[in-house]
Image (cartoon, rainbow, N blue to C red):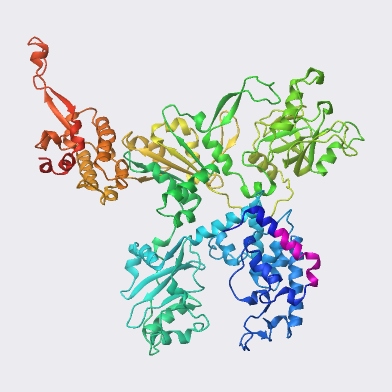
Amino acid sequence: MTRPINERQALWDDFLTRWPLETLGEMTLPQYATAGDKDCFVYWLETATEDLGSIWGGSAFKFGIYSRKNQVDKTSKRPIHYDAQYAWAAKYGETRETAFTAVRDIIVEVASAARAGNLAAVEDADLGNATKWKIAFLYQDRVQPSIVPVFSRESLETLFGPRKPGTPHKTCAQMQAALAAERGERALLAYGDELWARVETVESAKLTSEQALALLQDSDRFKATMAPAQKIAGFRNSDGLELALIRETATPTFFLTPGDWLKPARGYLVSDPVLYTADRERNSGLATHAPSLALGHPAASVKVASRADLLKLLDAYDDPEGSSATDSPVPPLPMPSALTMPKPPLNQIFFGPPGTGKTYTTVDAALKVLDPTFLAAHVGDRVALKARFDALVKDRRVRFVTFHQSFSYEDFVEGIRATTETDDEATSGAIRYRVEKGVFAELCQDAKRNRQLEAKIGVRSAARVWKISIKDANASDHTRQYCLTHGEARIGWAEAGDLRNANLADPALKLGPKDQASLLNFAHEIAVGDVVVCLSSTSSICAVGVVSGDYEYAAQVPQGVRSDYVHRRPVHWLTTGIDFNILPLNKGVQLTQQTVYPLSRVDWPDLLQALKAEGVTLADVPTTLDPTPEPYVLIIDEINRGNVSRIFGELITLIEPSKRAGADEGLEVVLPYSRQPFSVPANVYLIGTMNTADRSLAGLDVALRRRFVFREMPPRPDLLDAVTVAGISVGQLLRTLNQRIEALLDRDHCLGHANFMALRAEPKIELLAAIFRNQVLPLLQEYFFEDWQRIQWVLNDHRKPAKAFQFVQARPQDTASLFGDDVNVSRSRQAWLINDIAFDHPESYLGVMDHTAAA
């Protein structure tokens, strides 16, 4: 079990105390590597600090030189040297002394480069890959770390997913830099735990060859192209998806794959122990493969250089006598469409009768957009999928809203809301009205964010923008310049004392409402991760920064700073010395002299975009950030219950894929309340659900059909075919009920299988009775508008010979005795009643399917 983070931090301290960088160059060979010594450098590196990141596995030559436990004389064809005590790679020298000196110099070089943040130098170091990155990790600057505790190339590549065809491989340095940037302000070791969890998630997504075969065999196109003697074993990704074939003949089966060994393939891995038994050195030449395999060697993995070589090898295997490949060519196999993972549609709606799992399916649909690898790894594991979905909701990558008759454009896009929030235009407690974004506009705003950038510069997810005035009172006062160059913001009112326990309402302080508001905002309302802009004039700002620390009271001010500027907050200034016109973002409202107040009209993503548009360069922004925006999902439940035209307004056009921001036909509108330009980002996905029993699908055709992909969710009686309750086949029961409903009404009003799913875990007659009494019968009453005769037909009650098993019974009425002969009431009028006793008898349900079973 991995140690707690505080213990691992202490372990890291112990390592650096034992092996400080300053004396690393003085290390001797016995200190570096001595078999059985638990205080040598190699033991510390691999074993003692395992909880700081593992480098187990592989050959001991990863250390350059190592101490031999088995000192039997050895010879090797590889470029390796041995003596009685040590073995080393020949490239480091002819003797163990010269070899160790070379290895030690490399270790010092790696450690020094890591301490300076020079990852390129670590990359170039000639030492085992995982070994040098573990050394670099341990000796890096722990205050500003640049290396995460993942050291093998394979694990790093797993975190980045399959490489796109034609793109170059990332170096370990590039991957380390990107991951370090992604870390943001998270603790390094905790972030490392997150990364390893992600690696394990991908590893758990492996498919066996049998699963891969089943996946491929679902493709009609694949079936049509396979020769009778060919069977699929697996697939891989190397500049495109390839197939691996198993040929079945009189000789044992063997495994073939073109290019490199099996690697992640668009979210999938193929795994089978038999396929990893290859002798890579023996199987390194094409000419000798086929004959040896054809002679009856065991199943093996065979590495070939290209698809053309694969075809030659197949031919050679088919004809071990050595006929030419051109005599019986193997036709190239087309790509099976079943293996592709199509990009989810931007706008989709799941529609069907109630209880068919539409809302339930939105969890998988959202994960298919946001985390397809996790979805593939946990297919069928509802607990894991729901937990991952909930985490994405918490991270605000998914929003959920339900449309209803009162839901409006103001709720969805933007509207005017009353607020008592204090700013430059209102004193505390005063009611004012402002434009606020609805759920969809908020989602689009967040989708424009660059979360990697925000994590790097310290901007929090719900960052507010604050205006602050840091004034120069006279020519000799350099307060503002000091703050901008020393990473802080300061304001005055020294007489208030420490704002953490000050009574700002004390009349002796003579503070006006706006002065009090400024002090309260500065000390209590501004949060770490918020954005501050420094006033230059009523229309412009001179600096933009991110609050990086809590409020501090500094009674002693630095030289050159105004003596009353005792209230301080650490700020990471992103840009200074600018003259940026903020009026367009602030909706034309000029800045005031109030010292600190929120710019409620300005959002951080809009401010960042405007700064970039003006060519403003931000400090400390790495060039390795992934420019691909993260996808966001809005789930709209019961989309047909709202007035779609009124809710979406002019945005109904903007959600079309071709009209999204950045598309060739992209459109932008000016919102009616805020008068701000608005477009829908291409990384926003809309997933809707629609109950066809609530409103006809045709009623939404004009508004939605062209802009959404519709996916029908019909009842699935087959999911219940294995469920039997007191001899009743629940799947067949549902199937029969829906056949009658469809004949009497339509398919949009069928009963959903979700009503009966609880029976899979608890197949009891009491539960089935509760389902019929509380769910099925009320739905039928709604569907048929209290037409009890048709309800009786659906339940087959009119044909059941025994009334005790009829759910619905007709009771004739004697209208003459009730009203007399003078009242003209139909003498054939019937009253209907629900027979509660019928719900408890299996014969009642069996009679729905076959009336003779209810005798």
Residue 591 in the image: above or below residue 122: above
Across and down, in percent, residue 222 comes to 35, 66
The quarter of the picture where the N terminus appears is bottom right
Q: Which residues are magenta?
A: 12-26
Across and down, in percent, residue 434 comes to 61, 26
Q: Is residue 403 left or right of residue 770?
A: right
Residue 753 visible in the snapshot: no
Residue 681 in the image: above or below residue 516: below
Q: Is residue 96 left or right of residue 631?
A: right
How would you classify the magenta stretch by its main secondary structure?
A: helix
Question: Which residue lies at the image location 44% right of the left edge and 26% below the top edge?
Answer: 406
The quarter of the picture where the C terminus appears is top left
Question: Which residue lies at the image location 39% right of the left edge and 82% below the top edge?
Answer: 315
Across and down, in percent, residue 247 comes to 36, 77
Closer to the camera, 324 or 529? 529
- How many callouts does the rendering have? 0
Q: Quadrant of residue 342?
A: bottom left
Closer to the camera, 305 or 531? 531
Question: Which residue lies at the image location 50% right of the left edge and 36% below the top edge?
Answer: 651
Q: Is residue 131 magenta?
A: no
Residue at the extreme right: 476
Residue 834 visible in the snapshot: yes
Across and down, in percent, residue 845 comes to 19, 41
Q: Quadrant of residue 136?
A: bottom right
Residue 261 in the image: above or below residue 854: below
